[in-house]
Amino acid sequence: MTTSVKNLDSKRLGTVGFIGRFKPLHNGAVLALDMLCEQASKVKIGIGSSNKYNLRNPFTAEETEAMVRAYLKPKFNNFEIIPVPDFAHDTRYADGQKWKQYVVDNFGPLNYFVSGNSFVKSLLDSSYQVIHPAYCIPRERWLILRATEVRVEMAKGGDNWKNLVPRPVVDYILNNNLLVRFQSEFGAETLQEANSENYKRTETREEETNHAREK
């Protein structure tokens, strides 16, 4: 049930759902969260891949939630955070239907579900009106940024990564020694992958689906 931007109330979206992995929470993602919290009466924010700790998910669900709260709490009180685990690594649930049912059960009725992920859209389109985040953000404020880019900068060392995430998230990462842990556990592998592929490009639907099936 995809809807057009022309059908949206720019002042009030009602209750919306939005899922991201936020590994880490960066300036592109916070732009979407800001716009949603400003335009909706309630924003249900899902922490995707909440049951995974690996190269693409080098922060725990609890740490990721803390980053989101550190950024949003001083400004908004109309949000709720929901952990959303992956199931597709189990071949019985590789079609995404168990994930879909989990989302519907835990997010409940929504006016809109916001996602730019084509695989997510294909799963939820029959249950929610799915809109792209760009519909909620003025074109002049669009920012295309992937968390992979942030992680690569973190792995390189230096301070460039600090320009890609909001200050409360920088503080949380540093105060909890997460930068040192990330560099120790995943730094070399992150840089190796960055050298072997164009990590700034948008992933294909097939790549997104395959990532969901990783353990």
Image (cartoon, grey):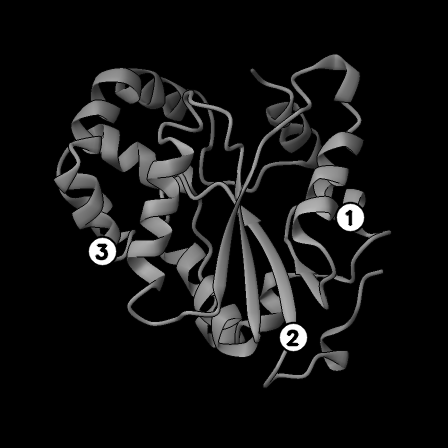
Q: Residue at x 65, y 21 (%)?
A: 213
Q: Residue at x 49, y 40 (%)?
A: 21
Q: Which mark is residue 168?
A: 3
Q: Position of residue 150 (x, y in %)?
A: 33, 41
**Does residue 126 appear to the left or right of 143 in the view shown?**
right
Callout 1 amino acid: Leu
User: Rounded to the nearest whole Å, what is the CA distance between mark 2 and mark 1?
Assistant: 18 Å
Q: Quadrant of residue 103?
A: top right
For the N terminus, the quadrant is bottom right
Q: Residue at x 44, y 61 (%)?
A: 143
Q: Residues within 10 Å of mark 3 (few under 14, many from 20)?
A: some
Between 134 and 57, the one nearer to me in the picture: 57
Q: Is residue 5 above or below residue 108?
A: below
Callout 2 amino acid: Gly
Q: Residues within 10 Å of mark 2 (few under 14, many from 20)?
A: some
N-term-proximal mark, 2 vs 3: 2
N-term-proximal mark, 2 vs 1: 2
Q: Residue at x 72, y 40 (%)?
A: 119
For the C terminus, the quadrant is top right
Q: Quadrant of residue 4?
A: bottom right
Q: Which residue is mark 2?
A: 14
Q: Which residue is mark 1?
A: 124
Between 116 and 11, the one nearer to me in the picture: 11
**Does residue 199 appear to the left or right of 39 in the view shown?**
left
Q: Is residue 172 above or below residue 34?
A: above
